[in-house]
Amino acid sequence: MLNTYFRIIVGVMVLLSVVLTVYVNQNWMWFTVFIGINLIQSAFTKWCLLETILVKLGIKKEGVGCSVK
């Protein structure tokens, strides 16, 4: 479930930054760059701020159910 929320949120942020870049100001492209850098960083460090936030909000990681301790 966490992976699904993560992908939806990141996809919306990327699309939003592209729309803002086209219709508001070209500097919004830096938001897209920021998202990309964070994705690359998380691949190497295995840590992602968005994942931490989602877990604190109560989103369960995949494979974790009520009966699994």
Image (spheres, grey):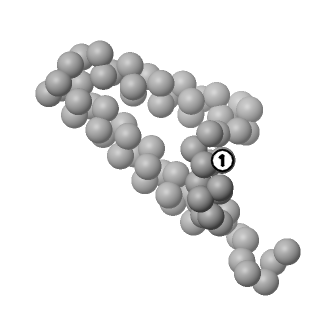
Judged from the image, the secondary structure of the residue bearing numbered disc 1 is helix
* Residue that appears at 51% across and 60% down: 4
* Residue that appears at 52% across and 51% down: 6
In which quadrant of the rendered image does the C terminus lie? bottom right
> Within 10 Å of the Cα at label 1, are there few (<14), some (14-19), or many (20+) other Cα atoms?
few
Establish if 40 lies above or below 8.
Answer: above
Query: How many marks overall?
Result: 1
Q: Nearer the viewer, residue 25 or 42?
A: 25
Q: Position of residue 39 (x, y in %)?
A: 56, 34
Q: Which residue is mark 1?
A: 52
* Residue that appears at 73% across and 81% down: 66
Left or right of 28: which side holds 54?
Answer: right
Q: Residue furthest right?
A: 69
Q: Position of residue 1 (x, y in %)?
A: 57, 66
Left or right of 13: which side holds 27?
Answer: left
Q: Residue 42: name its quadrant.
A: top right
Q: Position of residue 56 (x, y in %)?
A: 65, 55
Q: Residue furthest bottom?
A: 67
* Residue that appears at 71% across and 31% down: 44
Q: Residue 55: name its quadrant.
A: bottom right
